Amino acid sequence: MLNRKLNVLNFSMGLAIFLGVIGEIMIFLGIKDEGSIDFSAPFATGQAKTGFVGISLIFCSMIISIGTLRYKALETTKRRSDTEQSIKVKNGDIEIEWKGNLVHWNDSHHVRKLLDEIMSSVVKNNNKH
């Protein structure tokens, strides 16, 4: 286990566990400290106040854990989709095929739209001749 490479996901989960444990210890010891966090984002600004620092640490731990697990799920999905895929468009005797890797399901829509545009221009050119 000590041979494993430390990466961002491992560090994030370790930090989340550390914050959660420290928060639980503070709650069990009865440490009640007040504090506030000022935050500013394009969609909201404000101040978060807490009277229980242990609960705040557990909340931060939970947010980090959810973000890390979500990123891990996306990374796993991306790895699964690294196999080559193909999309075919056929119009009469003309057939166009695209082969490659689609990372997101929405990419297939864009590739299909592009192939349809190519097919329509090929059909127009064939009709002119």
Image (spheres, rainbow, N blue to C red):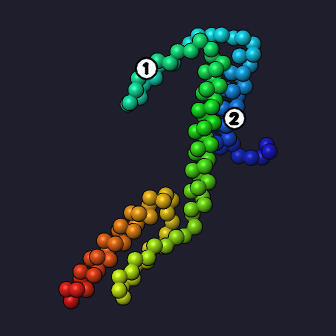
Image quadrant in which you'd find residue 96:
bottom left
- Residue 57: where, in percent of width, then height? 63, 23
Residue occupying the far right of the picture: 1
Residue highlighted by disc 2? 14
Mark 2 neighbour density, 10 Å: few (under 14) some (14–19) many (20 or more)? some
SS label for mark 2: helix
Q: Upstream in the sequence, badge 2 or badge 1?
A: 2
Q: Amino acid at mark 2?
A: Gly
Residue farthest to the front, as pictured: 92
**Corner quadrant of residue 56:** top right
Which residue is painted at 48% across and 59% down in the image? 105
* Disc 1: which residue: 46
114 is higher (above) or lower (below) than 53: below
Whether 84 is drawn above or below 73: the answer is below
Q: Secondary structure at mark 1?
A: strand
Most extreme residue toward the left, as rendered?
128
What residue is rendered at 49% in x and 58% in y?
104
Image location (x, y in percent) of residue 103: 51, 59
